[in-house]
Amino acid sequence: MHGQGRVFRRGRRWWISYCLRGQEYRESSGSEDRREAERFLRKRLREVAADQLGARQFIGPEQERILVSELFQALRQHYELQGGKGAAQFRSHLRAIEDSFGQRRVVDVTAEDVDRYILQRLEAGRKPATINRETQLLGQAFKLAMERGRVSSCPRIRRLPERNARQGYFEHAELEPVVRELPAYLRDFTRFAYLTGWRKGEIASLTWSDIDRGGRVAHLKPEASKNERGRTLSLEGDLWELIERCWAARRVKAGKTTFLAEYVFHCDGRMIREFRKSWRNACREAGVPGKLFHDLRRTAVRNMVRAGVPETVAMAVSGHRTRSVFDRYDITNERDLRDAMRRMQNYLRGQNSDNFRTIHEKMGHGEAATH
């Protein structure tokens, strides 16, 4: 007997027993040597004493057997139950972090291990934002397990600074040369993105059931939005003319049959999906290589701000949920900046005028005194 614990035999192996907060724990020492079992018991009793003193939470035998892959599997099920866009993003960032940590015991993962992983990924050329998404999944897996009582702690996970102010924009004169080089089915698709700032997937999902031609509005379904919030878009001016062109082009011929396309923007009646190669070639031929389709989204937000549209309204059109987008896109209200510069220069001119009058008055008084 050792304090509040004991050793005993089961078959050929020695087992240990000890108590914590009224609960008895029994586990095999894994050894046929009684002295090994006694040393193991003393180790456990030290861990129990540390927990009782509040120095370190007791882990116990069940937690020691849990692998990180089990935590990832629970997190994977959590994302699948949530649905929406999160499941796809989860899968895209999971592979590397699971390959590194999946077969390790949760009790063995330390903050130093996470730092080593971060350094390896940086050396492999991965961007800080990508690494943060990967290590974020590790933290989420641990926290979900803590909420469910499977583990008692989570390693501290470093977050790298993300210098991701985004700079890519389209000037108005650059757009149409690119549009002309695109396949016909992508031209109004691209113009729509330039005018609205909608995401590629949101535009592709639009069906004619989402368009109220009488009211001249388009309705984006919540399930088609990245943030799962639907929104309404007013179809005015060039945007309305664009939709009318699409309405006229909804009739599709397939051999001897003709049918009406379900989607507003379509390729031979089918939903538009991936077109990176066509986009890359069009940008190169138009003399703006390296432009991204997502640059149209940034451009639309910037153009609305430049036009004096309130930021909250611009966000409602483009579907951004938080004000931080203007920081990430490096967008400032240029009208406010110009007003600030005008006011400063007017102030300086006023200061110069006051100084001139003061000097002139002093000179005048001096001349009067000499006479």
Image (tube, rainbow, N blue to C red):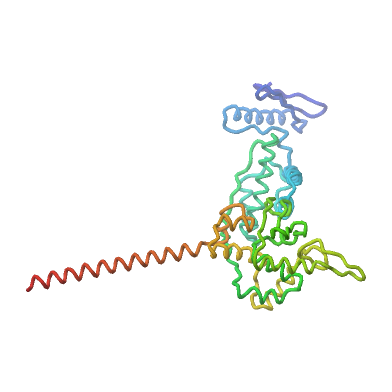
Left-right relation of 304 to 347: right
**Rendered location of residue 282, percent (x, y):** 70, 75
Q: Is residue 81 something one can see in this rendering?
A: yes
**Rendered location of residue 291, percent (x, y):** 65, 70
Determine whether 213 is above or below 17 in the image.
below
For the C terminus, the quadrant is: bottom left
Q: Residue furthest left?
A: 371
**Rendered location of residue 29, percent (x, y):** 74, 31
- Please name whichever residue, 35 or 247, is drawn nearer the observer in this view of the structure: 247
Q: Is residue 120 something one can see in this rendering?
A: no
Question: Residue 165's image quarter?
Answer: bottom right
For the N terminus, the quadrant is: top right
Q: Residue furthest front?
A: 214
Determine whether 303 is above or below 159 in the image.
below
**Rendered location of residue 357, percent (x, y):** 23, 69
Going 51% across and 62% down the picture, which residue do you hit? 333
Determine whether 28 is above or below 206 in the image.
above
Going 77% across and 64% down the picture, which residue do you hit? 272
Determine whether 35 is above or below 65 in the image.
above
Left-right relation of 211 to 330: right
Number of residue marks: 0
